[in-house]
Image (spheres, grey):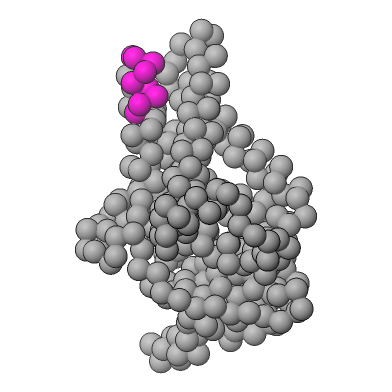
Amino acid sequence: MKPSGIGGQAVLEGIMMKNQSRYSVAVRRPDGEIEVHTDEYSGIAGGRQWARLPLIRGVVNFIDSLILGMQTLTFSASFYDDEEDQEPGKFEEFLQNTFGEKAEKVVMGCTVAFSIVMAVAVFMLLPYFISNFFRRYVESNTLLAILEGVIRLGIFVLYVVLISSMKDIRRVYMYHGAEHKSINCIEHGMELNVENVRKSSRYHARCGTSFLFIVMIISIIFFIFIRVESPVLRVVFRVLLVPVIAGVSYEFIRLAGKSENPLVKLLSLPGKGMQMLTTREPDDSMIQVAIAAVEAVFDWKSFLGEDETA
């Protein structure tokens, strides 16, 4: 296995692929044709050196993935927006009049900020408050930290299972599988075609699902060893440590994506197991979209050629 360095995500009836600063979005339009859009995204840090430092790069990459994910999801949804030709509402007019050309960036920034706040509230603070109900029955802080982690995992799994009941989300999960399979195909030295992608694995160590799972496991470890008596400080620490936990988790996912070490592979298995919930086997039309997205930003033929001559 040879790491390619490319990554992506599923969008509505399509796939986004990113290679360094260049990204593509391939979408299956309602008429059946594949629309491919390519562009540059330099990130919130603009390529500055400090953003590449260990731990810090995990937080930066997480925020960048949210922003780019929102942008590409909006682009893919535009092909299926029945209200696209309607007049803008009063709120949209207010934003346009107030911020002008920056209105879209302002909305995107607010959406990302709201998403982060909600994620912290639901997956970090809510499990703490639920586990607090057991504090009168459990004296061990270690057991409480483990219980909090189990509750956090339970909420995450419940969330994934509930949204997977939606038809559109199930198709997104199939495109998610196509994204993984296409990357696995070239990283395992096979030509990028429908047949080879179809027989490749839909599980990948660098998946966002694995990242979130590792975040929850790392949070258990942190909260076992970092203890404070004040209930207010416990909440404050859970918020302040989110970037640190995300940074540590990213370093592990980054290592797992390029390591053949048996121990690293073993530690990656639970995260890959979670991908059973967030990926589905795609059909050939979805695989074709994935291939189009990869080829728009990545020269896989040269990649395989270098591998053969190495």
Rendering quarter of residue 223: top left
In this view, the residue in front, 77 or 55, is 77
Q: Residue at x 40, y 69 (%)?
A: 41
Q: Residue at x 52, y 58 (%)?
A: 70
237 vs 7: above or below = above
Q: Relative to residue 265, is residue 287 drawn left or right?
A: right
In this view, the residue in front, 38 or 185, is 38
Q: Residue furthest left?
A: 49
Q: Relative to residue 300, is residue 58 drawn left or right?
A: left
- Stretch of the chain drawn in magenta: 229-237
Q: Residue at x 51, y 62 (%)?
A: 71
Tell me, yes or no, if residue 206 can be seen here: no
Rendering quarter of residue 263: bottom left
Tell me, yes or no, if residue 166 can be seen here: yes
Place of residue 9 in the rendered image (x, y in percent of width and height, measured from the top left): 56, 63
Q: Residue furthest top?
A: 136
Rendering quarter of residue 256: bottom left
Place of residue 40 in the rendered image (x, y in percent of width and height, measured from the top left): 41, 74
Q: Main secondary structure of the magenta part?
A: helix
Q: Residue at x 64, y 66 (%)?
A: 78
In this view, the residue in front, 191 or 262, is 191
Place of residue 109 in the rendered image (x, y in percent of width and height, measured from the top left): 43, 51
* Residue 59 is covered by the magenta coloring: no
